[in-house]
Structures are given as structure tokens and as C-alpha cells.
Amino acid sequence: MWKVLLRLEYTVCYSLHPELLILRSVGVDLVGKTAIVTGSSSGIGLECARQLLARGLSKLILAVRDEKKGAVAREDLMSGRDLKAGAIEIWHMDYSSYGSIMSFADRAKALEALDIVVLNAGIYRIPRVILPTGHEEDIQVNYLSTAFLTILLLPILEAKRRPGTEPGCLTVVSSSVAAWSRFKLPQDGRPLLTTLDEPMGTAAFDHHQQYCTSKLLGQLFLVELTRRVPSSVATITYVHPGLCYGSGLARDSMGTIAGFIAGIIFRIFGRSCVGGAQAIVDAAVAHGEEAHGHYLVDGKPAKLAPIVYTPEGGQMAQRLWKETMSELSFAGVEDIIEALVS
Ligand SMILES: NC(=O)c1ccc[n+]([C@@H]2O[C@H](COP(=O)([O-])OP(=O)(O)OC[C@H]3O[C@@H](n4cnc5c(N)ncnc54)[C@H](OP(=O)(O)O)[C@@H]3O)[C@@H](O)[C@H]2O)c1
């Protein structure tokens, strides 16, 4: 019965999004390759992990903040598969702590190989939460920590490249809601990251805007990063998985009327996490160096948020780059990037 329902879901999903049929046919063989997927204990990340294994991936690192959830995910991924011992490892990594991200990256240096990195972990908070880093949680997780891990993993991807093979691939899960951000550069000289952490006077915290802005910052950062770092280091892409139902992203609205209505909208207009993961896995494994710096939507290069192409977006990107380098200066990120370029 459930197989019939699954087939029905596929049929509806692909009739709404026929382009996914093409993605499914990409026959990439990942035997002998190693991948890291962040946020892989649930939702789209878990499905990404499953699809990478289905293509023969030899080693998978589940980067998760909750190792118990990671263990359940590993059981699920292993069932029905004949994998070697140690083929799936669970590594702790919490984006709310810079120390945790650095330990994770240090551990990755000892991997025998690293070919694919999918930076999928993300959050959509409804209450305004300030983390011990001093930053609001959406901005910290979706932007600052993702950018930090990107920088730390690039030299490792470069170092682990085997002679005669293509550069490794790092793909960041973005979202087309970046285009909905109404964020404006502060005109009073305050750092833009500071303005995003501050309470908004008497106005209510606009959680949806904050999420959209966190994804916009990610796009602005990657434009700057891929301008500096060549594709010979790693093919860096960003990808939109599409509107997906069945993940934990909307967990803060569970049990509310707004959450119930959003759930119905997601179910009607969205695709399953399997469909979202197909778009991400396509970005991570089916494109070569020519895709460096591309924002991929269902396997094709797409436009970033419109503001990215404006003079204001250019100014925003430059200020963001400077502030990000300063925020992460404790880890010598500018030197890391400089070493990649030279
Ligand atoms: N769903 C959509 O419609 C949609 C659309 C566009 C883009 N996206 C993006 O797709 C990605 C995956 O989202 P999803 O829909 O699959 O939601 P999800 O099920 O909530 O998955 C998000 C993952 O990120 C992890 N995570 C959250 N905060 C973290 C932290 N501080 N440190 C480490 N990991 C953390 C979560 O871990 P826990 O399980 O421990 O909470 C979870 O595994 C996100 O980047 C999201 O922005 C989603």
C-alpha cells in the first residue's frame, strides 16, 4: 500500500516539476568517494545522504548537532544496504558554536579523502533567539556559520584532491526566498550584521524577513567568495531545493493555526524532501568546474536575488565581506582564503 502511495507522490511531484525527471536520470557513480552532509539527521539533508549512498558513495559523514538523532538516521540509511563497516560516521557539529565548527573541520583534515560537501544545515526561527556568539540564530546558522565552515573546508577539499581527478565540490543550500528580503544597508555607519542582531524597537521581530535576509547574505557572500577562490580549489555552487514539505524547518510553528495553513500550502505547492534532495545532489555531483559560482535551481543556472546585481547589492556584498572577515578573524580566515588564491 505504502509503495502505491509513494508512487502516487512521485507522479504528482513530477507532474508539478517535470524537470526533476531529468535530474533522476543522471547516472553518476560515487564509488570510492567521500562526502560530508551537514544537517543530515532529518529533512532534506537526510534524503541527500540517502541519494548519495544510492549512487555508490563509499564514505559518508553525517554532520549533526544531535548525535542521537544522527544514530537513528544512520540506522535508517544503512537498512537494506550492504555497506562496509565505518561507511557512515556521525560527527558532532553545532553551528551555534564556532569552537564546534573548528573542531569539526580539524577532524575532517584526517579524512583519507574528501570529494563532496553539502552544507545543508539551516534554521527558520520564529522567536528571536540570540546565541552565545551574540548573533540572532537565523543569521548565525544560515549565514555566518555556513560561511565559516565553507572557508575551513575549502583547503581540505583542495588538499584531498587525487591526481588526475576533477576538483571536489562544495554546495551550499540556499533558497530563492533570498529575493524576498527587504534588507537595506544601514545609512548610519553601523555594521550591517549588528543591525540584524538588534531588537527592532517596538516593532515585532519579523522572523520571515530574517530568514529571507539570512539566505540573501549567503548569496552575497558566495558571489564574493567565488570571485576570489578559483574553481581549481573546488567547484562551489549554491542550490535551491524548492519548496519542500515534510521537513522540520517549520517546527516552531507546529500546533499553531498559521503553521497548519502553511503546512497545507507546502503540501499543495511543494515537493517532497526527496525531490528537494534530488536538486541538491544534482548540484553536488552532476556539474563540473563550469558550474563554479552558479546558483542552481533544478539542475540549471538561475538568477540570484535581484538586488545582488544592483549597485546597492554590490555595496552590501563588500560591507558584508569585510564584516564577515572581521567576525571570523580569530580563525585567520583571510589568510586561509589568501593561501587558496595564491
Ligand atoms: N524546506 C524547504 O521548503 C526549504 C526551501 C528552501 C531551502 N531550504 C533549506 O534547506 C535546508 C534543509 O532544511 P529542511 O527543510 O530539511 O529543514 P530541517 O528538517 O529542519 O533540516 C535542517 C537541518 O539543519 C540542522 N540544524 C539546525 N540548526 C543547526 C545547528 N545550530 N547546527 C547544526 N545543525 C543544525 C537540523 O538539525 P536538528 O535536526 O538537530 O534540528 C536539521 O538536521 C535548510 O538550509 C533550509 O533553509 C528548505
Image (spheres, grey):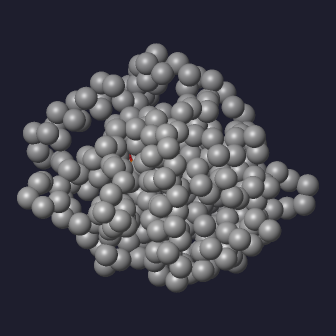
Residue occupying the point 36% across, 54% down = 185
In the picture provided, is 308 more to the left or to the right than 34? left
Nearer to me, 331 or 53:
331
* Quadrant showing the C terminus: bottom right
Is residue 244 at least partly visible in the picture?
no
User: For residue 104, what is the image quadrant?
Assistant: bottom right
The residue at the point 86 percent across, 53 percent down is 165
Point out residue 7 in the picture as x, y percentages from the top left corner. Answer: 45, 23
Whole-percent x, y for residue 240 in the image: 49, 39
Give the image quarter of residue 83.
bottom right
- Residue at the right extreme, as displayed: 164
Residue 83's place in the image compared with 54, above or below, is below
Q: Quadrant where the N terminus lies?
A: top left
- Position of 112 compared to 190: left or right? right
Residue 292 x %, y %: 69, 46
- Say how many tags the image has: 0
